[in-house]
Amino acid sequence: MLKDITLGQYFPADSVLHRMDPRYKIIATLLMIVMLFAGNSPWTLAVGGLFVLLAQLLSGIPFRMSWKSLRPILPVLFFTAILNLIFIDGGETLWQWGILKVTEGGIETSIFMFVRIVLLLCGTSLLTYTTSPILLTDAIESLLSPLKRVGFPVHEMAMMMSIALRFIPTLLEETDKILSAQKARGACVDSGKMADRVKALIPVLVPLFVSAFRRAEELATAMECRCYRGGEGRTRLRQLKAAPRDHIALAICLLFLGASLMLNLLKL
């Protein structure tokens, strides 16, 4: 199950989305988030879904890869949808048992939130799928560069965010190895009652934290050995330059966002 989580991983390819300027991809991702949560009708949600589908096709990432990363999170999404279905009131009551009841507003909110979160996860995952950690760091630093005027540590923040994203698959891989080692020694970590499973995971946390601190120390040592001293006076091998395709992609994003906002204003 842990191997199915691909958040933070980069998949090299030669697609349209891979060749885009990473700064424009970050901006497009932010516009997509606004697009998904700005509307309150099926049509606005359909516009956001069409945008995510178009981005998926242009990325060259197989749909099974997105489904593989989404599958471990589905139980949480279904549980959240059930809570919204039962506890959100609004409209005609369709079913009631004690304090629990299902209304038209609850069904609508449950479906909307489920679809929105699925589209959000699929859309934002494409950013890390198609952008290497180095380019992502440079893009974040470039977008936040105006904050340097007020003394904000832009380079350090961008580097920290990039390292955090890169450590996610590393920690998941380490957790899977520890679980396999525990099972080989006779530990039962995936059977029994929920309380037993939680207790069985406690011995996993100690070696996981030790491994995480060890990897962090190794990374710090490697950066010091390469004379890393932050972003002051630092040069880059690759300079970010926007191409015409980046402007076209941003225009398409704004067009989708405008269509979503227009549909929302017209209450369609």
Image: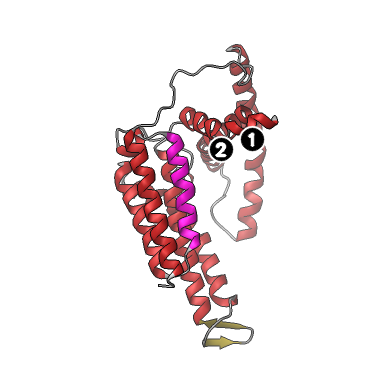
- 250 w.r.t. 40: above or below: above
Q: Which mark is residue 178?
A: 2
Q: Is residue 32 magenta?
A: yes
> Which of 255 and 138 lies nearest the eye of the viewer?
255
Query: Which residue is located at x 44 percent, y 62 percent?
Result: 261
Amino acid tagged 1: Pro
Q: Classify residue 84 as left or right of residue 12.
A: right
Q: Position of residue 242 (x, y in %)?
A: 39, 31
Q: Earlier in the sequence, mark 2 or mark 1?
A: 2
Pick whichever, 250 or 61, lies toward us: 250
Q: Are marks 2 and 1 in contact (CB under 8 Å)?
A: yes
> Is disc 2 surrounded by few (<14), some (14 to 19) or many (20+) residues within 10 Å?
some
* Left or right: where 249 falls relative to 28: left
| Residue 75 x %, y % | 50, 61
Check disc 1 and report its element: helix, strand or loop. helix
Q: How would you rate the neighbour count of disc 1 (Cα within 10 Å): few for under 14, some for 14-19, many for 20 or more?
A: some
Picture layout, residue 151 above or below residue 206: above
Q: Residue at x 52, y 78 (%)?
A: 105
Q: Point out residue 171 in the picture as x, y percentages from the top left corner.
A: 55, 37
- Residue stretch rendered in magenta on the structure: 22-38
Mark number displayed over residue 99: none
**Secondary structure of the magenta portion, mostly?**
helix
In the rendered image, which residue does mark 1 sit on? 207
User: In which quarter of the view is residue 227 placed?
Assistant: top right
Query: Residue 264 at what x, y percent from top left?
Result: 45, 67
Label 2: state its secondary structure: helix
